[in-house]
Amino acid sequence: MPAAQAGDYVDAELAETLLRQSYTEILRHAAGMRATSLACPAIGCGIRTYPIREAARIGLGAILEDRLVPYVEVRIWDWVTFLSWRQECEALALTACEEADVQDALWDGEPLANWHSKQLSREKQYCAVM
């Protein structure tokens, strides 16, 4: 939920806490299963339109905080979200994938049938934190 609209439901601080806890619980569950890798969506960057750059900062912070899973891949479905996550990766001096590597792989509002037919390789991941 957007921090600007969170007042309708919860305050902005609680909204941030809930988003961080979502990532933490996913990571703890995966670690409990002894997962060595995890792919998860960019939580908070979808229909509820939480501020994307803030959601990226919170998500990356949670992923990097405990390092419960050695390899985490964040799945991103549109170009604006990708650019925001990449900016946050760069701000933290993390390696992020290049625009050319992902531009054709992003859904970005196309019919899902078209998106599913695209070939995605392991080298062309959306965003990875190792």
Image (tube, rainbow, N blue to C red):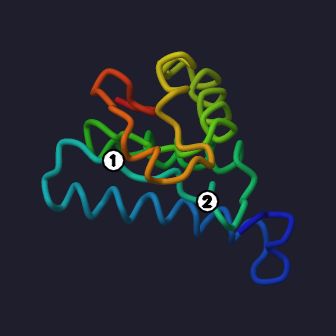
| Residue 81 position within the rendered picture, expressed as x and y whole percent measured from the top left | 64, 41
Q: Which residue is mark 1?
A: 39
Which of 47 and 3 lies nearest the eye of the viewer? 47
Q: Is residue 23 left or right of residue 92?
A: left
Query: Measuring 38% from the left and 36% from the top, which residue is drawn there?
Result: 118
Q: How many C-alpha atoms fall within 10 Å of the one at disc 2: few (<14), some, or many (≥20)?
A: many
Q: Quadrant of residue 119?
A: top left
Residue at x 50% of width, y 22% of height = 96
Q: Which mark is residue 49?
A: none
Q: Amino acid at mark 2?
A: Gly
Secondary structure under the numbered disc 1 in the rendered image: strand
In the structure shown, which secondary structural element does the residue marked by tag 2 occupy?
A: loop
**Residue at screen point 49% across, 26% down:** 102
Residue 30 x %, y %: 24, 58
In the image, taking residue 112 as reference, residue 9 lies left or right, namely: right
What number is the disc on residue 44? 2
Amino acid carrying label 1: it is Ala
Q: Where 36 falls versus 122 (above or below)?
A: below
Dividing the image into 4 quarters, which one contains the N terminus?
bottom right
